[in-house]
Each structure stands twice: as C-alpha cells, then as structure tokens.
Amino acid sequence: MELSDLTTAFDDRDWQTLTETDDPVRFAMVGVGWWTREQAMPAVAAGDLAETTVLVSGDSEKAASVAADSETVEHAITYEEFHDGVASDAYDAVYVVTPNAKHLPFVETAAELGKAVLCEKPMEATVSRAEQMVSACNEHDVTLMVAYRMHTEPAVRRAKDLIEAGYVGDPVFVHGNMTEPILELVPDPDQWRLDWDLSGGCAAMDIGIYSLNTARFLLDADPIGVQGSVASVAEEFDDVPDEHAAFKVDFPNHVFGLCTASQNAHMASHIRVTGTEGEVRVEPAFYPWDERKLHVSHGGSEMEIEFEQIDQMEEEFEYFAHCLLTETEPYGTGEHGLMDIKTIKGVYESAETGRVVELD
C-alpha cells in the first residue's frame, strides 16, 4: 500500500460498529467542576450513544443549578447520597472527575452498585489505591476504563497505523512533551493539582502521563524501566516536587522514550516516533482545543496531514458507551492505567535515588 493511501483513506471511528441505539448509556457525572460542565456534558449531549441523567456533587446547590440547564438530567444528588445508592436506577455508568486522591471511594461504590466506570486519568494518587480500584471492579465484574483521550484521537490512531504498517521501520525513539502555565489556566494557588495529598504529583502525574500513555499506545508496548528528574522552582509549587519533570522510559527491544512536562511553561504539546526508516509526529497533540496535525517523513518525502477536527471528549464517551453496548473490553482498562501510575511513581523514586526504576 502506498503512503498516500494510508494517509487519505481513513475512518475516524474505525472502532465503531454500532452507530445508534434506542437505549443510550445513562451517565452519572461525579464531580461538577468546569471540566464536567464545559467539556464532558456537552460532549455526551453531542453524541448518539449516551446521555447524562445524574449529577453528583459536594455542593448540592451547584449540582441543582447545572441540572436545571440540562434537558436530560433527572437527579442532582450529593456525594453522600451517591454512596447511599440514591437514584442508582437512573444511571448505568459513572464518570469520575474528582481530584485524583478521591477517585477510589466513588469507583468502589459504583462497582458495588454494578455500574460501569469511566475514571479520569491519572486513575488515583497512589499505586495501592489504583490497585484497590482495579480489584473492586474485578470483584463486581464491572467495566473500568481510564479516560485516555488519545486512544480515540484520529491523528494518533492514524500515526499508530503508519507505525504498524512499517512506514517508520523499527521504532527507535519516542519523544513526547506537554507543557502549560497552570496558574494562568486555573488562577488559584490553592488548587488541588498543587496539593501532593490530593494529586499524588504535579507535572509528571497530571500531564506527563499524556506523553507516557500515548507512547505506550503508539508502540503497543509497556515500559520496563524509568529514570526521571524533577524540579520545583516557583514558590507556588512548594508542596509538590515537580513543577517541571523529564523522564526516560525504557521499552522492550531497546526502544527509548523521553517525556517532558511542565506546569509553568509555554503551552505546547507533541508526540513523535522516530524509526530506522521514517518518522511520524502529531503536533499539536494533547490539548483538545488545538487543531491536531500529523506529520510524516518517509523515503525522502515529507507530508503534513490535516484532519477534520473532532471533539476528543465526544469521541471518548462514544467509544466507552460503544464498548458497553457491544460488550467489548475497552483499550484503556484499569490494569492498563495501573501501569501508568507505577511508571509515574517510578519517576519520583528515580528522581530521589538517581537510579533507574525497574517496572513489572
């Protein structure tokens, strides 16, 4: 197949077999912050396979106010009511988007209620709590998917196709970067991302995970070792070690990944795979409001492939709902997400010891 064929004939939803349903997956949104209101709920409303029927918040008045503006939300309940099973007959799945260290109890309750779970990344603040999430969902035989948007991003999926078709030869290096000025985006020095107990980490944990997980997806491989460096310079980051982070990830077959992340730098993102015969690069890559582009180098030719831009959150929710409706296991399982937590925690351990941390 010619390179031009691979870069033009592409189905954005090559995973989809079901396009409509009379029984959409009904979601309870756990956490009603700006991401839920401005990204998740509009994405679900725009899709065909899901709807939002329940809102769960620590602030009952806020939840009720948001519910009043929705055509599909039937119940606005508190966290305590959620754990008590209130309105549990009104939803089939939960989307958990609280601070990292608060994911576990909501996932455990959802599992006990027999509800599928879509949990924001990173899946928890510690390895042990992430393991408890996986165990709870396995015990109750419910689906747990970690919310990795890149798995359904067309530019990234096309890059994966090119790599698997051999157009870069044997992969050698993966470079990923995601940086942002978090205090300009969220102008609150007391926000949970800067609180170690709530976040479990800052730059590496919150946004370094994008480069790490996308590299795993593109290579279809898991890391076997990691070595990292971190630094916090500005006083607003005194509670976390990683205002800035850089880490090298060892993959099988001598493939090396380099990931960089900062919560106090110019906003930018990319992911690049360089092989023995070519290179693919998605830039911009990770921010949902950027127009993603795929750049391909092969056989002395350079191509820039533009895509009809999609709503990454809509694709993510539609994919998860599609998996539930077709009884298909999602790519980003709890076990898959657990490897990211182990790797990121390895970054912090390595930064303290100066040694490579082996992963299993």
Image (spheres, rainbow, N blue to C red):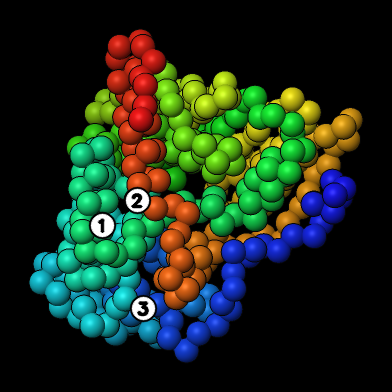
- The extreme bottom residue here reads 22
Tell me which numbered mark, 2 or 1, is placed earlier along the sequence: 1
Amino acid of disc 1: Asn
Residue 181 vs 351, above or below: the answer is: below
In terms of sequence position, does the residue under pointer 2 or pointer 3 come before the other?
3
Q: CA distance from mark 2 to mark 1?
A: 9 Å
CB under 8 Å between discs 2 and 1: yes
Q: Do residues under tags 2 and 3 come within 8 Å of each other at their CB atoms? A: no
Give x and y (percent) for residue 124. Answer: 27, 45
Where disc 2 sits, the SS reads: helix
**Which residue shows up at 32% across the image and 71% down it?**
93
Q: Nearer the viewer, mark 2 or mark 3?
A: 2
Viewer-proximal residue among 170 and 304: 170
**Front label number (2 vs 1):** 1
| Amino acid type indicated by mark 3 | Arg
> Which residue is found at the position 74% from the left and 31% from the top?
169
For marks 1 and 3 on the same chain, the one whose residue lies earlier in the sequence: 3
Looking at the image, which is closer to me, 283 or 126?
Answer: 126
Which circle marks residue 138 in the picture? Answer: 1
Q: Nearer the viewer, residue 336 or 313?
A: 336
**Which residue is labeled 3 in the image?**
26
Q: Amino acid at mark 2?
A: Gly
Residue in the image at 65% along x and 55% along y: 154
Measured Cα–Cα span from mark 1 to mark 3? 21 Å
Left or right, 97 with reference to 331: left
Q: Residues within 10 Å of mark 2 (few under 14, many from 20)?
A: many
Residue 334 numbered tag: 2
